[in-house]
Amino acid sequence: MKFKRLFQILVLFSLVFSSFGVSASATSPSTLSDAMVINRNLNVWDATYIGFVSGSIYEKWHLELTEAHDFTVSISTVTGDLVPLLTLQDANGVEITHGIGSLTTSQPTGSYYIQTQPESGSGFYVLTLRQIVNVVPSVSTSVTPTSINVGESAVVTVSLNNIPVEGYTSAEFTCTYNTTVLESSNIIVTDLFGADAAVAINGPTNGSFIVAIAGSNGNKATTSGNAFSFSVKGLEAGQVAVECKARVSKGDNLLMDLPRRLRL
């Protein structure tokens, strides 16, 4: 009788918190233990789901991936003395990995299940499913204005984007352009690498120049931002691309090429 009443309370609690992402459930007996297993669905990234587990009630969350994802599943206990165990299973119920309180994994397209059960204790919990977005560092070049007449000038800004937490101690930029259509001048370095950064400029010569910047006194670039700017002047009509490549160092005496992207 007590178990029946507990299950009724669980169903009522799930309905009350349905706006937090709890999905409809069905029950089925477990083939591995005497616990009842409640089947649920995870169908929204960064959503909050409410659940309950005990020694006699487990929950199994279905996750369908239509493409490869890096993701984290975590549980916070709301009531009781629950210490939650999460087990990631494949479509056949075979364990892939597990974790106490949370797990982080990278999985290809497919069907998966995340079973929640007590490592110890019991209680209500909040489960969150978060996608890990891998952000790639890059160098970008923007021109303002994007169109000029012969004799007019524009400002080109070169930026470092998505700088990793460890930062960059130095960077070397190589910019190229068509000297028939444009001429460049007035290269101005920002304080992205801190105050009193060491700067070396080679050129402009034959449609290219190099700007090298290194932080001093332990300074480094730790946040995305503009590294330097320069002016270009239109010499004759036509379309021309201004490209700037970048190689950066984290202080390990190695230079790494960054991918380029156009920033409008």
Image (cartoon, grey):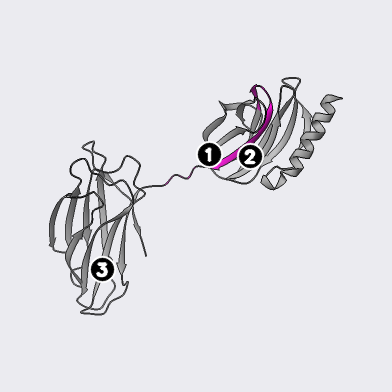
* Residue designated by label 1: 71
* Labels 2 & 1 near each other (Cβ < 8 A): no
Element type at marker 1?
strand
Magenta stretch containing residue 191, yes or no? no
Q: Which SS does the magenta portion mostly show?
A: strand
Q: Between disc 3 and disc 2, whose residue precedes?
A: 2
* Residue designated by label 3: 155
Q: Residue at x 78, y 32 (%)?
A: 27
Viewer-proximal residue among 79 and 23:
79
Q: Residue at x 33, y 49 (%)?
A: 223
Q: Quadrant of residue 37?
A: top right
Q: Quadrant of the N terminus?
A: top right
Q: Between disc 3 and disc 1, whose residue precedes?
A: 1
Question: The disc labelled 1 sits on which kind of residue?
Answer: Phe
Distance, label 3 to label 2, CA atoms, is: 49 Å
Q: Residue furthest right?
A: 1
Specify the label residue 255 is tagged with: none
Which region shows up in magenta?
117-135
